[in-house]
Every structure is written in structure tokens, then in C-alpha cells.
Amino acid sequence: MKTTEILIAGFGGQGILFSGKFLAYKGLLEDLQVSWLPSYGPEMRGGTANCNVILSDTPVGSPIITSPNVLIAMNLPSLEKYVDTVVAGGQIYVDSSLIDAKVEREDVEVFYIPATQMAKDEGISTLANMIIVGHLLENNPELSFDGAAEVVEKLVPPKKAALKELNMKALSLGKNYNK
């Protein structure tokens, strides 16, 4: 595996930090070198939130990402802020339920997933983030869906056991989304 730098951005309450934690923990279970650096405004819900995740088979020198291979944009301000930072040949995942804008760059692969609408339709409105993560796992050659259930099992606390099945449902929706 080469080093994969993932920037997840949106606003508080969208599960940005959990998505990053999921990807970082998945990397740990795959014996990768991992960095997880969350950042959020003091407001938490509704404020800005982003998370840097680095997965590598070599030691990670810095947790800060300036040119990600992958961007997950959960709202328009995040897309506008980070779209030009993605390296040529990288990937951009856009929640098209919340973002009408199209990415103008032709040197990146763009995935438009109506994750928020899909989550509402399935009765899992708080898990749009995991729908996009499922799509990422399916469509990024450096990542895979293998081991996702084990990560969910480890990250979701016992007192919220019902969320384990719902997170797997969201991941599967993203994995199987084709458009």
C-alpha cells in the first residue's frame, strides 16, 4: 500500500470524526501505520469539523495533510475550501444531497453520492457519513470493505449496540451505490 491521505470535512453533527476514527481503526487492524487528527470548532454541532487520516505501510512523519489523495466533502463550504488541495489523480467524494455544485477539475475522480437523502430514506438519517465511507472502501484501490464489521464491532460501544447493525447497513448502502 502506498500512503493514503484522507481529508474528511463538513460540519459538526455529521459524523466527520467518527468516519475518520473508523478509517484509522481499520488501518490499525490491517497493521498499517496510522494517524488520526480531528479538528472542530467550539460549537460542535453546526460548527466546522474536519479530520485528517493517514494510512501507510511506512511510518507517518506528520499528522497534518496539505494535499490529500482523498477528500470527503459533506457540505459546500468544505468542498469549496478543499477541492483544489486534492492531488492530481486523487478522489473526491461529495454528498450530493447537500451539495449542488459540480467539481470542475478533470484531473481527479469524483463520486457524487446522495448520502444524506439515502440515509433519510432508510431511516438512518444520522449515518450519511458511513454511506460515503462504504462507497470509499468500495472504490478506492488502496482500501477494501474487508474487516468493516470488525471495526464497527470495536468502535460502537455496548450501550449503543443497535447502532452496530445500522452502521453496517449504511456501509453496505454506500458499497452498493452505483451511479
Image (spheres, rainbow, N blue to C red):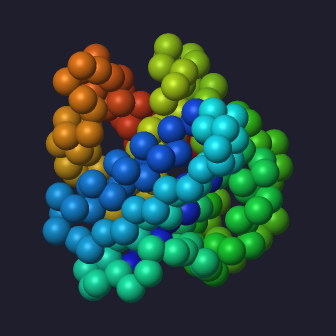
Q: Which quarter shows the C terminus? A: top right
Residue farthest to the front, as pictured: 42
Judged left or right of residue 98, residue 108 is: left
Residue 29 in the image: above or below residue 35: above
* Residue 18 image position (x, y, % from top left): 42, 43
Residue 36 shows up from this direction: yes
Judged left or right of residue 21, residue 49 is: right
To which quarter of the image does residue 87 belong?
bottom right
Give the residue at x 17% y 68%.
31
Give the residue at x 35% y 81%.
60
Give the residue at x 29% y 20%.
160
* Residue 147 image position (x, y, % from top left): 20, 49
- Nearest the eye: 4 or 146: 4
Residue 84 in the image: above or below residue 127: below
To which quarter of the image does residue 59 belong?
bottom left
Residue 40 in the image: above or below residue 103: above
- Nearest the eye: 19 or 176: 19
